[in-house]
Image (cartoon, rainbow, N blue to C red):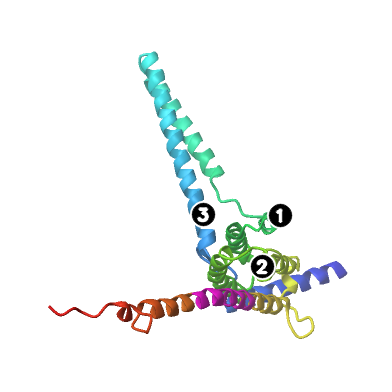
Amino acid sequence: MNDLTRDSDRILQEGRALVRDNRDGGRHRLSGSIGRGSADLKRNQLVRTLRNLGIATGGILVAAMVIGFVINGLGFGGIMATALVLLAAWVLIGMMGKVKVPKRADLASSLAKGDVRQLVARTELWLEHQTPALPAPAVQVVQDMGVQLDALGLQLESIDQNHPKAREVRKLVGEHLPEMVESYRRIPAHMRGEKRGDRTPDEQLTEGLGKISEEISSVTRQLAEGSLDDLAIKHRYLDYRYGSGPEGSDAQLPPPKDI
């Protein structure tokens, strides 16, 4: 009897969670790539798959023509066999050509190596595959985070990887962010909408992702400040050296000679 009661409560809670998700827009709203890093991974994989398909197709057709020439024609059976080999090759290459979803170990590997480009791309791709389990508000934060990760990656590539901010943000993106999402996913679905304290796990996740998003944006701005300052200094120097100031080009030109 107690088991039936618990099952009934669980079903009711899951039903309420489903209604809440549908009201908020559902959990499967993400479409496409959230950032340039994950999009590049997918595009590169597609290029490799198409290349492999072309090589396999060309090789099989050349082999079939050579065999046909040697035995003086393939015949209907040979043509069908060639078609089956082609089909099998396409299916196999297609299956092998799927983009491999990174695991936490892959993110940790990129973090340890200091490979910013791989860390950003793999984190974006990993996040994309977590969104079906996330509440709609969190999915929106993740989608916005993709653009921020792209901008952050560009800034990190241009600075010393031992810079304190670089180490801090790599840890934030490669460790704290996936830990938060995985902690949420370990909570049973029917309990994610229950209040614990003053917030539900859904609300805690969305708020936590929002804080990480704000920190990524803040660090990106701080790193960009150095580039903006360098650009301003160069502009002032060029204006002083070649502009119309006392050291500018106008001042350096000799006075015109009388004809």
Residue 202: x %, y % from top left? 69, 76
Q: Is residue 131 left or right of residue 247?
A: right
Query: CA separation, marks 1 and 2?
Result: 24 Å
Residue 154: % across, % down: 54, 66
In the rendered image, the quadrant that contains the C terminus is bottom left
Residue denoted by label 3? 42
Q: Residues within 10 Å of mark 3 (few under 14, many from 20)?
A: some
Does residue 8 appear anywhere in the picture?
yes
For residue 105, the mark is: 1
Q: CA distance from mark 3 to mark 1?
A: 20 Å
Tell which circle, 3 or 1, labels the residue nearer the N-terminal end. 3
Circle nearer the viewer, 1 or 2 = 2
Instruction: Give the numbered dot on residue 230.
Output: none
Predominant SS along the magenta part: helix
Residue 119 lies in the magenta stretch: no
Region of the chain picked out in magenta, as a range: 214-230
Q: Nearer the viewer, residue 8 or 189?
A: 189
